[in-house]
Structure formats: structure tokens, C-alpha cells
């Protein structure tokens, strides 16, 4: 059979399968991951984002000192962007037939990042940089997990990852500015 013929018979098979399991919505039979595992992993990221939103909001309100106005704005902007990440993740979980876990009980134990208040402006910036670096590592691992098996989730995670890298860079720049020396220590 020609390549075109094979494609046509595939289309017939795809049409047949599409009529089955309609309750699974966007999750079709050739979905490459285990949907439950995917949802569980995304729910860990949901908890991480919630912790990041709360930490940045605390920092945006509580940062004090002459130099802190611009930093407060940066913290507030990051809190907004972490909330956008949360929305993207919960919508994807819903598309995968799962339930976003927004239950406040146990959020910090499900999250990869920590809720650290910090004693002063430098501490706050450092804690945010640490949290961003944790987010970067976990999102990068998730991107590898989803790979070609679920390209939609992978692309979404890549978008979030790119923004977490920007956040880390912002925090690094603030740290250099406010500590007055480059961070050379390993
Ligand atoms: Fe985020
Ligand atoms: Fe971030």
C-alpha cells in the first residue's frame, strides 16, 4: 500500500477510535503518558506555584528600606506571573481529566519550593532566588518526562520554565545590586 493509502486507513481507524471513550475528552487513545501520573506531577507544580505566590506577596508587602520600592514592585510582578503559571497548570489538569488540588491542607508538603519569609531585603531576595532555582530544576525534569509523549503539556511547561529562568535572573541581578558585589562563590 502507498504511504497515502496507509494514511487514509489510519484516518479511518482514528475516526473509529475518536467515537469511543468520549468521556475522556482531550485524552485520546494515543495519549503517551499515564494521565493519572501526569495530573499528580502537575499538582505538585500547582503547590509549588501557590507557595511562590504567597512568598512573593509577603515579600512585596514586607520589604522595607530606602532601596526597596523597586524591589517590592519586582516581587509583586513575580507574584502575578506565578499566579498565571498556576492558572495554566490547573487548566491543563482539567483538560487531562484530573482535578487540580487547591486544598490549602498540605500545600507546603506537596510543593518543591519553601515558604521562607526572610529577615531583611537581602534575605528575601536570596530566598526567592533559591525558590526559582528549585522551580527551574523541577520544571526541567518535568519537560523531560513529558517529552514527545505529551507535547502540549511539555510546551506549556517550557513556557513556564523560561519565565522561572527570567525570575531567577531578576533575583540574581537584584542581589548583585543590593549586596554590592558579584556572586562568585560556588
Ligand atoms: Fe512559577
Ligand atoms: Fe518564578
Image (spheres, rainbow, N blue to C red):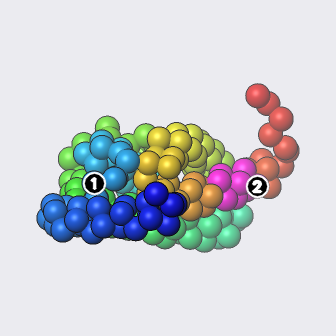
60, 66: nearer the viewer? 60
Q: Is residue 111 visible?
A: yes
Q: Earlier in the sequence, mark 1 or mark 2?
A: 1
Q: Is residue 179 left or right of residue 36?
A: right
Residue 169: image location, x then y, percent:
71, 54
- Quick one: which residue is furthest to the top in this view? 186
Q: Residues within 10 Å of mark 2 (few under 14, many from 20)?
A: some
- Percent position (x, y) of residue 94? 26, 63
Considering the numbered disc 2 on the image, is that residue within a helix, a strand or a loop? helix
Main SS, magenta residues: helix
Please name the residue shown 66% across and 48% down the image.
Answer: 122
Q: Quadrant of residue 87?
A: bottom left
Tell me where residue 139 appears, x and y as whole percent: 52, 47
Give how far apart the Cα atoms at labels 1 and 2 are: 47 Å
- Residue 85 versus residue 114 in the image, above or below: below
Which stretch appears magenta?
165-174
The label shown at residue 51 is none
Q: Is residue 88 left or right of residue 147?
A: left
Residue holding disc 1: 29
Label 2 beta carbon within 8 A of ligand 2: no
Residue depicted at x 37% and y 61%: 10
Membership of 166 in magenta stretch: yes
Q: Specify the label residue 173 is tagged with.
A: 2
The residue at 27%/54% (across/down) is 29
Of labels 1 and 2, the one closer to you: 1
**17 over 109 or under it: above or below:** below
Q: Nearer the viewer, residue 60 or 101?
A: 101
Per the image, is 153 magenta?
A: no
Q: Position of residue 39 (x, y in %)?
A: 30, 50
CB contact under 8 Å: marks 1 and 2? no
Per the image, label 1 sits on a secondary structure element best described as loop
Task: Name the image quarter holding the C terminus.
Answer: top right
Amino acid at each position: 500500500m502507498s504511504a497515502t493509502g496507509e494514511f487514509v486507513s489510519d484516518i479511518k481507524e482514528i475516526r473509529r477510535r475518536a467515537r469511543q471513550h468520549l468521556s475522556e475528552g482531550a485524552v485520546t487513545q494515543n495519549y503517551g503518558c499515564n494521565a493519572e501520573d501526569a495530573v499528580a506531577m502537575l499538582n505538585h507544580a500547582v503547590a509549588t506555584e501557590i507557595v511562590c505566590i504567597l512568598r512573593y506577596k509577603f515579600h512585596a508587602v514586607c520589604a522595607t528600606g530606602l532601596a526597596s520600592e523597586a524591589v517590592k514592585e519586582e516581587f509583586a510582578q513575580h507574584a502575578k506571573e506565578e499566579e498565571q503559571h498556576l492558572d495554566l497548570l490547573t487548566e491543563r489538569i482539567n483538560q487531562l481529566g484530573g482535578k487540580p488540588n487547591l486544598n490549602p491542607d498540605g500545600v507546603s508538603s506537596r510543593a518543591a519550593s519553601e515558604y521562607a519569609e526572610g529577615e531583611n531585603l537581602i534575605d528575601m531576595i536570596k530566598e526567592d532566588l533559591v525558590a526559582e532555582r528549585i522551580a527551574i530544576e523541577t520544571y526541567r525534569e518535568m519537560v523531560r518526562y513529558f517529552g514527545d509523549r505529551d507535547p502540549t503539556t511539555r510546551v506549556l511547561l517550557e513556557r513556564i520554565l523560561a519565565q522561572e529562568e527570567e525570575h531567577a535572573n531578576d533575583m540574581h541581578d537584584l542581589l548583585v545590586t543590593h549586596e554590592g558585589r558579584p556572586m562568585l562563590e560556588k
